[in-house]
Amino acid sequence: MSNLRVIVVGGGAAGFFAAIACAEKNPSAAVTIYEATAHPLAKVRISGGGRCNVTHACFEPRELVKRYPRGGRELLGAFHRWSPRDTMAWFAARGVELKTEADGRMFPVTDDSATIVDALVQAAAKAGVEVRTSLGVRKVEAVGTAVAPAFWVTLTDNTELRCDRLLIATGGNRASAGLTIAAALGHAIEPLAPSLFTFHIDDKRLEGLSGISVENAATAVPGTKLKESGPLLITHWGLSGPAVLKLSAWGARELAAVNYEFPLRVNFVPPHTRESLLQEFAAVRTAHPRKQLGTWNPLGLPARLWERLLAVAGIAAATQWAGVSKDALAQLAGQLVAADFKVVGKSMNKEEFVTCGGVRLGEVDFKTMASKLCPGLHFAGEVLDLDGITGGFNFQAAWTTGWLAGQAMAG
C-alpha cells in the first residue's frame, strides 16, 4: 500500500520494533512513533542494571512459553514466527553481537544498554520512522470500515491526525493512555497487578546481612502451589533475586489478593532435605570432630549467613562438631531447609517494572497482533495481558509481538 499512514502509540521496545518492521517492509508507509515522555526506550536503557537483558538463550518455543505466567499459550505460535534466534540475528545484522551468560540471559557484548538503544534508534531513522517525544495520544476514534480501516487520533497537544493503522504499545503501566484507548475501542482490560517484585520481611535473621546472596535457594508459599528456585539476595528490606522474582511473577494475582501478606518458606541448600542434611552433619562430625562450626561450614553458604543461622539454632560459633548436640543440629537443619518468614509487603524490583493484566488476549489475533474487534488496530508488548519471569523473557515477547504487528501493518 502506498501512502499508508501508521501511528505507533508508545516508544518502548515493542513500539520501536514494530515501527521498524513496518517501515522496512513498506518503505512508502509513513510511520510515526508518539512517545508521551521525553525519553523513548527508557526501560531498555535501565534494564539489566544498565546492561539490557535482550533475550534468553531458550530456542525451543515449547520450552520458551513455560517462562510466561500469562500469555504462554498464545505466544507459542508467535515464537515459531519470531524467536530468540531471530532477535539475535536482527541485532547481529545491525552490528550488535549478543553473548549468553551461564544462566541463559543474553546481553550485548558491550555490557551497555546504550548499544541496544542506539541500534533501535538508528534502524528507525534508517527506515524513515519519525519519532515524536513528549507528545502522547489522548484519544482515538475508529472512523473507517473493515475493508478500509481509519482512525482519528487526538494528540496531547490537541492536534488531530488521521491514520490507517494504529498500534498500541504503551507497556503495562496503569497510568498509560494505551489501556484507556483500547477500552474505548471496545477491548476488555484484565485488571493490572505488579508481576515482578521483591518481598518485604522484617526478621532478625536477615538484619545486617543486606547484599549477601545465596547461589541457589528454593522458595515456596505454603498453602499454595507457588514454588521456585534460583539465586536469592538479602536486601535492606527483605528478600529479592530470581528465586523471589520468579515466585512473584507466577503468584502476581494470588499475592495481590492477600495484600502481599503471606508466609514464605526458604530452603537455603536445595536439594537437601532435613534428613539428608542431618546425615551430612553426622558425616562431618565423624570426619572433622575438632573443627569449630563457625569456621567449618560444609554447605558453601556465605559465612555471615551461616554464622547467623548457627546463632538462631543456639549454637556458639566456637562449638566443635564433636560437641554439638543432636537437638541443636536438628534446629540448624530446620533453619537451613525450611526457614519460615512472614512477608508484609512488596517493592518493585529496581530495574523491572512488569505488570500482569492488560488487553484481553482472546480479543487479539496472535498471527498479526491485530484486534479481532476493531479493524486496523494492533497491539504489541506488555499492554497485553502477558508477562514473563525475569531473565529477558519480557523483552523477547516485545520483539516478537512488535515484529508480527509491524509486518501485518505494512501491507
Image (tube, rainbow, N blue to C red):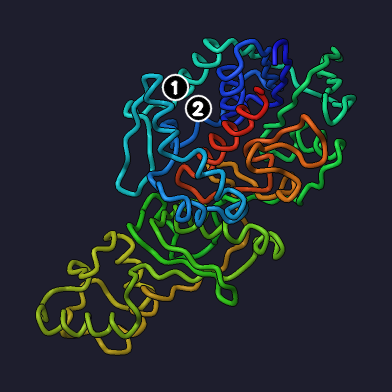
Q: Which disc number belongs to residue 114?
A: 1
| Image point (55%, 75%), residue name | 222
| Image point (17%, 73%), residue name | 292
| Image point (38%, 56%), residue name | 231
Q: Which disc number belongs to residue 384?
A: none
Q: Which amino acid does label 1 sit on?
A: Ala
Above or below for 126 versus 328 = above
Pick whichever, 91 or 23, lies toward us.
23
Q: Tell me where residue 57 appears, x and y as whole percent.
A: 38, 44
Mark 2, other Cα within 10 Å: few <14 / some 14–19 / many ≥20: many
Q: Report if residue 245 is visible in the image.
A: no
C-beta proximity under 8 Å, tags 1 and 2: yes
Q: What residue type is labelled 2?
A: Arg
Q: Report if residue 343 is visible in the image.
A: yes
Q: Tell me where residue 202 appears, x and y as whole percent.
A: 54, 62
Above or below for 31 versus 356 = above
Pick whichever, 286 or 36, lies toward us.
36
Mark 1, other Cα within 10 Å: few <14 / some 14–19 / many ≥20: some
Secondary-structure class at tag 1: helix
Residue tagged 2: 45
Q: Tell me where residue 78 appears, x and y as whole percent.
A: 56, 43
Give the position of the N terminus as an image quadrant.
Answer: top right
Q: Tell me where residue 253 appears, x and y as whole percent.
A: 67, 59
